[in-house]
Amino acid sequence: MATTPACALVIFGASGDLAQRKLVPGIYGLAKEKLLSEQFMLVGFARHEMTDEQYRDECKAAIEKHARLKPIDAEVLNWLLQRTYYVTAADYGDDQSHKRLQDRLTELDAVHGTGGNRLFYLSTPPAQFEPIIDCLGQHGACSYEKAVRRLLVEKPFGTDLTSARELNAIAHRYFDESQIFRIDHFLGKETVQNLMVMRFANAIFEPIWNYKYIDHVQITVAESLGVGTRGGYYDKSGALRDMVQNHIFQLMALVAMEPPVALDAQSIRDEKVKVYRSIRAMRPVHVDQQTVRGQYTGGVIGTVTTAGYLKEKDVAANSRTETFTAIKLFIDNWRWSGMPFFLRTGKCLSEKVSEVVVRFRSPPLTLFQKQCESPVYPNDLIIRVQPDEGISWRLNGKMPGGSMNIRSVALDFSYKSTFHAEAPEAYERLIADAMTGDQTLFIRADEVEAAWAVIDPIEIAWAASKRGPEPYAPGTWGPESAQKLIELDGRRWHGNGEEPEPIIACSL
Ligand code: BG6
């Protein structure tokens, strides 16, 4: 990555959890990698009353706890803290507080030479987006002919199509689409970006990348932890809105999209939007047949005991919010006609893993199945997003010896062992891209709306259904119905323990 240009990064919600766990440590990561300009400054804005010094202490503690690159480099840390400031807000929509913020920015521009370039990062609950954007607009902060002004917005970007459209309209009151950077941190992950390289920089995939050779695609984003302290937010959201509409759909779009005409933001995002628009709309009867909802009960995962979702802090005792979902859907276009995509995500599952499994069709003649004692498994291409980022090809190989015994073998490519380098944190990449103005890894307005248009009918059917989510025990792969969803199709989830782990035939 190249050094980013001069700018001020203003974080709204500066003392919140995301800012402390990801944003501030990410900015330190950029500083440590020498990717920040000498003319950079960080300004926090939040309702907690604090001085610059107190905010610097908070940032220092956050960096010491969460930085990717350890041990902490004292010189880099000091460099960053010297250009870190804080403005207390009476409220996010308080005019006087915004005036103080703008005055302070102007004064600090002169000290740090940031040239009036400002990135406004909204890391607050979505209810604050409108007051903040309106105040920025009224104070003339959103555009300035001599400098760059940009808006970065954290998810959730709306809770349905209507609210997403409203948020887009609010942002467009004062910002042009080219200034808006909607964040989906999964796009900042290395392996997610590598999906495009794998597909479009290797000629072998294109001829077989369609329904004729692929049997189905599975996308799993499983987490072993529960909702933790985020019950208040999560209970109004649920797994479908929290994970599928954004992270899982992004993975699916990168797997399913047509080759873009160029590697620029517009060309790539045009192709992703086409994928969402091609998803077959679900009527209530399809929602019944093609979706599963689950909610974790009390139990033990490893050494952690949970009392169950309904006992989590800030969760309604009779909540019907799903903490797990599995969905089968179809992309009705030339490439994927009639071929299912299975998506699943959940909290309190047996492990934390995000992966895409492309399962190929069986060979046309089942020659070996008839003759061998050992089963012959279909070929899988497994793209591991996390942990242990990499790509694995599952093939069938003959076991040495006189008889025709077949064994699943894997050609394994692991990022860590191949490149001997730590991938940057997703937020480091995204913040740097926003500073340079590259929108490729950010969600465009029509993209976010097209994704909600797929989600809405499912949410509506679930809300109208008499049935709530099915309970599942923590440490499992979700409710029984999630197995049935795929097994009734004669398929099975990867990694459910039925198939032997392959022998690693080749490890990169
Ligand atoms: C967030 C969701 O967007 O992504 C969380 O709101 C989830 O519920 C998190 O835990 C997962 O991100 P990661 O990078 O830890 O896989």
Image (cartoon, helix red, strand yellow):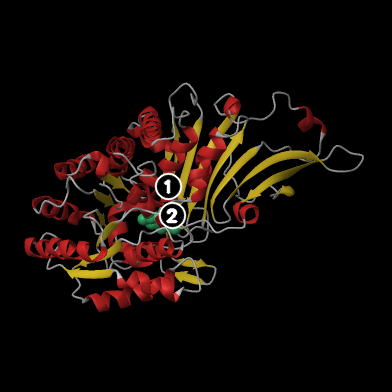
Q: Which element is circle 1 on?
A: helix
**Marks 2 and 1, how far apart in space?**
7 Å
Where is residue 449 shown, x and y percent of the image?
28, 37
Q: Are marks 2 and 1 in contact (CB under 8 Å)?
A: yes
Residue drawn at (55%, 68%) of the image: 302
Disc on res. 426: 2
Q: Residues within 10 Å of mark 2 (few under 14, many from 20)?
A: some
- Which residue lies under the disc numbered 1? 187
Where is residue 97 shown, x and y percent of the image?
11, 65
Q: In the displayed orientation, state which residue is furthest to the right.
A: 402
Could you say which quadrant of the image residue 81 lies in?
A: bottom left
Q: Is residue 374 visible?
A: yes
Residue drawn at (43%, 63%) of the image: 29
Earlier-in-chain disc, 2 versus 1: 1
Q: In which quarter of the image is ligand 1?
A: bottom left
Where is residue 312 shown, x and y percent of the image?
35, 66
In the rendered view, would you say 434 is above or below 337? below
Q: Residues within 10 Å of mark 1 (few under 14, many from 20)?
A: many
In the rendered view, would you say 154 is above or below 226? above
Q: Which amino acid does label 2 sit on?
A: Ala
Where is residue 213 shown, x and y percent of the image?
60, 27
- In this rendering, the count of numbered labels is 2
In the rendered view, would you say 477 is above or below 409? below
In the rendered view, would you say 362 is above or below 158? above
Q: Can residue 315 be seen in this view?
A: no
Whether ligand 1 has any atom under 8 Å from the Cβ at mark 2 is answered as yes
